[in-house]
Amino acid sequence: MYRGRLVRLGPLKRAYLPQYLAWINDPEVSRYLFPGQMRFLTPEDEEEWFERVRKARDQIVFAILTVEEDHLLGNCGLKNIDWKNRHASFGIFIGDKRFWGKGYGTEATRLLLRYAFEELNLHRVELEVYDFNTRAIRAYEKAGFRREGTRRQALYREGRWHDVHLMAILQEEWEADVAGR
């Protein structure tokens, strides 16, 4: 599978679900993930999600693991894959907070973009990110994403309104970025 200096992307395994559930139920992690009402998920919720992903034709999710110790960090994937128009939405989370802000998410993002553009031959990958998730915004920009627009005050979280930014990268932008590295 895809491997970098820090992380590799591996298959999503049922054995990872308890760890994912613990991270998703951590408010410090989930505040960056879910746009709606924050709620705690159950093992059954996580099992349903796993089965949906496993069967989906428009979604691909990988586990993110460290190269050195094969330590589970989170996951990343593509959803709403439109095979005709060759675009998809990107999502990632690093659940292990000890690895936040250290380049693991940026590298996982770059690896998934390589998969999206080289293997799937997608033309465009997009994402939405909350304005308060500055660490993620920096990682996305380092990976080549560009801001395309803002949904002003589209998220109400922690007693105030927040903007949601739309970012995207095109296949030719990714190719130029890779050639320039």
Image: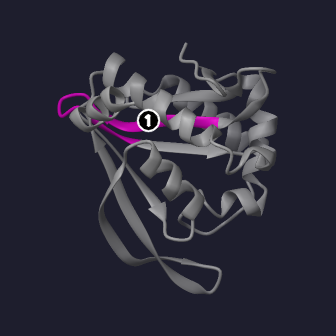
In the orientation shown, which residue stands out farthest toward the left? Answer: 85
Residue 34 visible in the picture: no
Residue 146 spot, x, y in % from top left: 33, 53
Residue 11 spot, x, y in % from top left: 61, 19
Q: Residue at x 41, y 31 (%)?
A: 113
Looking at the image, residue 160 lies above or below residue 144: below
Residue 101 spot, x, y in % from top left: 67, 51
Residue 135 spot, x, y in % from top left: 59, 58
**Residue 90 appears in which quarter of the rendering?**
top left
**Residue 47 appears in which quarter of the rendering?**
top right
**In the picture provided, is 138 more to the left or to the right than 70?**
left
Q: Residue at x 78, y 41 (%)?
A: 43
Q: How is the image coloured?
A: one colour
Looking at the image, residue 25 lies above or below residue 103: below
Stretch in magenta: 75-89
Looking at the image, residue 141 lies above or below residue 172: below
In the orientation shown, which residue stands out farthest toward the top? Answer: 1
Q: Which residue is mark 1?
A: 78
The N terminus - image quarter: top right
Looking at the image, residue 83 lies above or below residue 135: above
Residue 41 visible in the picture: yes
